[in-house]
Image (cartoon, helix red, strand yellow):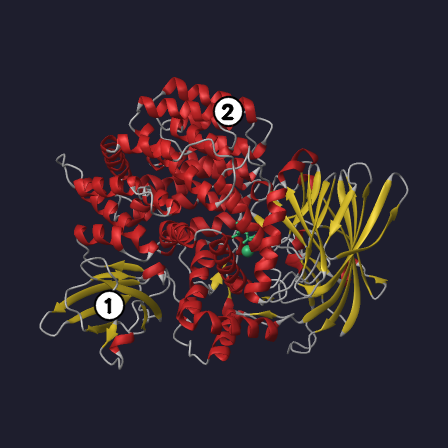
Amino acid sequence: MRTNQPTTIHLSEYKVPAYLVDAVDLCFELFDDGARVHSTLSVRHNPESTEESAPLALDGDSLKLESVALNGKELAAGDYEETDEQLVIAKVPVQFELKVVTWIEPQNNTRLEGLYKSSGMFCTQCEAEGFRCITYFPDRPDVMARYRTRIEADKNTCPVLLSNGNDVEKGDLDNGRHFVTWEDPFPKPSYLFALVAGDLVEKQDTFTTCSGRDIDLRIYVEARNAAKTRHALDSLKRAMRWDEETYGREYDLDIFMIVAVDDFNMGAMENKGLNIFNSSCVLASQETATDLAFQRIESIVAHEYFHNWSGNRVTCRDWFQLSLKEGFTVFRDATFSADMGSSTVKRIEDVTLLRTAQFAEDAGPMAHPVRPASYMEISNFYTLTIYEKGEEVVRMIHTLLGPELFRKGSDLYFERHDGQAVTTDDFVRAMEDASGRDLSQFRLWYEQAGTPELTVSDNYDDEQGVYRLTVQQSVPDTPGQTDKKPQHIPFALGLLGADGETLPLTLENDQNAASAPVERVLELTEASHTFEFHGLSQKPVPSLLRSFSAPVRVVYPWSREQLLFLMSHDSDGFNRWDAGQRLAIDVIQSLVASTETVEVEPRLVEAYRSLLGDATLDQALVAKMMQLPSEAYLVELANSPDVAAIHRTRERVATYLATALRDELIECYHRNTGTDVYEITPESVARRSLRNTALAWLLMINDETGRDLALAQLSAADNMTDRMGALRALVNSDYASERTQVLTDFYERFQEDPQVVEQWFSVQASSDRAGQLPQIHALLEHPAFDWKNPNKIRSVVAVFAGQNLAAFHNPDGSGYEFLADQVCRLDDSNPQIAARLVTPLTRWKKFAPAYSALMRSALERVRDKSELSADLYEVVHKSLES
Ligand code: BES
Ligand code: ZN
């Protein structure tokens, strides 16, 4: 375990490494009671380093050092210094070979960093700093080496032995053991190293690249999961083709492997040629995975595959540059998913996450820029800001440059930096050089934290036919950052006429009014801009920030008429949805604020009614539009939110709407239900989504027909989407005995399947009916719950604190105390997960005083825990000190 007072690392103190490693030769002897790691490094002084006779300092964590030899000569104890975190050799030649032998205990590794065991299988997770838990090494991404890895293990328990690259040698050893040697021809940073050893079955496929090379694709899983690999393999092939066509990127090794493991801190990891996946992010079958899970698997498989270029061939110079690979790769996988399905729906989902969770992060105590300036524990910086805001930043470059110049820019980036460890600035420079555009002001997106706010006002001059739009921007203060400069913001907009038609946008200096476009991307660079649109015979309704062209908040005094109008006429699908959300938010907020019982806006009811009845609309979009803004988003939008009041009001509005729309909901359910065979096409996914949305509404009002439909659907379902849709609706209803019954039946049927049991936990933990604190305690005592498995912890504890807001924010503080207890308990076994889990408490400042005091005291209790990990230390202290 690390020291208690972690040090802060600053970007400004970056220095090139004093020593480089050209080659690494590893030999792993794997046993039941531990593993011996022999490492041979070819080291030389870095010619770019000014530290001439610097000591050699290697990182290490939880290692037992057995021996060190330099150029074949064993070092004596006085020749080197061993601390908790480093092995230092004061005097080394300019070039030498270093042999280090360490002993580690994968079977006792509960942090799941480095080499550990999951369901009897050895596996690794090295990003960001896990390689140092395997052997001593300069564990930083700008040290890139060629790896050769020999694995020796028992042939019975570990018939499959995998590492990066190609297998070059294999054979039997004494005592029922065997070995395989792997060689990766591409130099890589240590964080991309991987090893897997276990009893796995192999599922095989092939992909022929654009240049005609046959790539051997393999997925390795435990035998019981053999029937759940098809979707991932198909997704992989689609991603490989897409990256060739869209980015001109071909795969580079002859073999690409994916391994599924049950115990994994994250979703998946892009190790060179050997991606390791959390089982829940790769295994799927019709019976066990929902449509959402299928889509998520497709995008994660693509994401990790895309890293082969954006991350592996071109990697990060240091961890401050993390968004260089993550933001860019999320942009790549989002574009891929948009191309595979409905781009509007994909955009709605991504923006929902961004606005609900990233905006909250950006307004909270851990707010940081896309390229942070400092950190204590890097694993705390795999954040929504690095990923989702980082994606938006790349997307804005794409919007500003247009697709052709963006592609020229990415080609230049990959060509110029192939084999290098670079910075976000190198990425932006490649985009500038390829396009001729100046992005110097745009770079502020990487440096300034906080969500910019755009305040928009307008007026119409009917004598001149001129519509003026003024946009003012400001960037809020964040911890350690004040007085921010205006940013360069692409602001897409359209104007709608009285009949809903899109109007030509003729700016004052436009020569050719006749060919004026109907959509424009205005570029905001100053604190205030006024745009004049000419030749308009009526006051238009503005459609602002189309497709969410920048990660900003837009404030404009929309009237309910305007929102209703946009909701049914905007040609931008995203903004159509957004208008509906804004209207619902306005209705809910006005009811939260008022003390009398006011009627729910009748025009909202009618808008939903026409949505439900309109079979000509994209049904996937209808299903999205039929969803009320989440409690979490309503909380995010409020100042000093009273969570209980928001919860009650949202329920009241939902109940009112469902009562008014009951017949239409039943009709919609039947229209979207039939004897259709299960397929994962956009049309059938939309049908299932819509019928399950209708069920959820009906059960909100405890409708008997709805209940019967749900029970019938549950027993007839041939797929998990329908089964889960019905289960969720029933669990969230007041039919208490049905709820208990269906939960019991469901568990009995699927208890052998960990991925389904995780969904079963989540449905309960997120429900205000089935997930009150005593029931959550019972889930933790359930035989299927496992404190060593991050998925189980997430599906109960994180889902409770993040999705069951009314229960978590119980005014008596019990939800907070509960979370503090679980965080403390977990910190001793898995600090990364503990630090993530504590997030909801860190937002204490936002809430109304009574809540906030209780949250703070729960957080102080975590702070005062003995032997606090570095991970938790950073999050808790920053939150309390802000
Ligand atoms: N490189 C990360 C995985 C990672 C992150 C490992 C932090 C160790 C520490 C991987 O490429 C990734 O980003 N995975 C995401 C899913 C992805 C679809 C955004 C994840 O694991 O959540
Ligand atoms: Zn990633």
Residue underneath mark 2: 746
Residue in the picture at 37% in, 22% down: 708
Instruction: Indicate the amino acid at tag 2.
Output: Phe
Which mark is on residue 264?
A: none
Give the image location of residue 604, x and y in percent.
21, 42
Q: Quadrant of ligand 2?
A: bottom right
Q: In which quarter of the image is residue 769?
A: top left
Looking at this view, name the residue that lies furthest to the left.
Answer: 463
**How would you rate the neighbour count of disc 1 (Cα within 10 Å): few for under 14, some for 14-19, many for 20 or more?**
many
Residue 234 shows in this picture:
yes
Question: Relative to residue 45, is residue 335 depicted above or below?
Answer: above
Looking at this view, name the residue that lies furthest to the top.
Answer: 737
Q: In which quarter of the image is residue 158?
A: top right
Give the image location of residue 628, x and y in percent.
30, 42
What is the quadrant of the C terminus in the image?
Answer: bottom left
Instruction: Indicate the amino acid at tag 1.
Output: Val
Residue underneath mark 1: 471
Q: In which quarter of the image is residue 286?
A: top right
**How would you rate the neighbour count of disc 2 (Cα within 10 Å): few for under 14, some for 14-19, many for 20 or more?**
some
Q: Mark 2 or mark 1, which is nearer to you?
A: 2
Q: Residue 436 versus residue 383: which sits nearer the camera?
A: 436
Q: What element carries label 2?
A: helix
